[in-house]
Image (tube, rainbow, N blue to C red):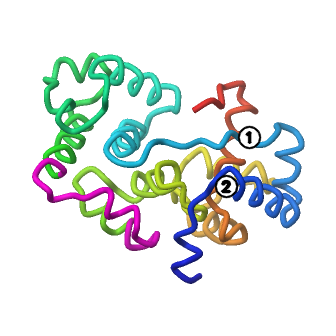
Amino acid sequence: MNSQISHRVLTEATFNEALYELTVRDSDLADLVSRWGAPPFWTHPPGFSGIAIAIISQQVSLESAQAAFTKLEKLIGSINPHNFLSLDGGALKDVGFSRQKASYVRGVSVDITRDKLNLKEIESMDDDSARKRLMKVRGIGPWTADTYLLFALRRSDAWPRGDLALVKAIQELRGLENIPDLDEVELIADQWRPWRGVAARILWHYYLSERGRSTSA
């Protein structure tokens, strides 16, 4: 895939275009959309707040991450590096940050205030370059970088490799007896290029809906 396509940013119009194309190409995805409706166009704001919620979301449920982010917003108003750095460990623990996650977001805050990290610059990079740059930041691994690309930068083909809900949803989607390994998941997801970011939303929407959980972002 060339960088122009990998750098495609989803809009409401292209999101709907992708939904149509994916459901035409893949009858299993079409069945999910028929049963549960189109997924929400989940997005996060780009920049510091988007990085913060990506880190908060590590290894916790969507509901827990959203609750913590909402508490943080109520506590400091504008979520920016300076406001975040004004909070002590006790305040962050009350919001829902573990010590480790608080340390990660503090590190991002310091890097931004010292001009060591330019998130605006990352917005103009192609997917691979943006992912690699983000992963140089302490606390940002592949999953966190990919979810930032997916939700904050709205990249059409971002795919959070290793996301457990997506793995389980794919197992159920394809009727697999065993949980697929990551390489098998990658091969399946490759069929949805250049719209893997939209396929992920379909699968998450199905996974949450099937289990009676909220699908609002």
Residue 14, horizontal then vertical, whole percent:
70, 59
Indicate whether residue 122 is drawn in magenta.
yes
Q: CA distance from mark 1 to mark 2?
A: 13 Å
The circle drawn on residue 95 is none
Q: Residue at x 55, y 78 (%)?
A: 4
For this rendering, which residue is in front, 106 or 78? 78
- Look at mark 2 in the image and give the residue it sits on: 198
Residue 197, position as x, y percentages in the image: 61, 57
Earlier in the chain: of badge 1 and badge 2, it is: 2
**Position in image of residue 150 (x %, y %):** 52, 54
Quarter of the image that includes the C terminus: top right
The residue segment tinted magenta is 112-130
> Quick check: marks 1 and 2 in contact, CB under 8 Å?
no
Number of marks:
2
Which secondary structure, mark 1?
Answer: helix
Q: Which mark is residue 206?
A: 1
Please, what secondary structure does the residue beneath circle 2 have?
helix
Image quadrant in which you'd find residue 157:
bottom right
Specify the amino acid type for callout 2: Val
- Decide: is 7 above or below 201: below
From the viewer's perspective, is 170 left or right of 143? Answer: right
Q: Amino acid at mark 1?
A: Tyr
User: Image check: 125 left or right of 82?
Assistant: right
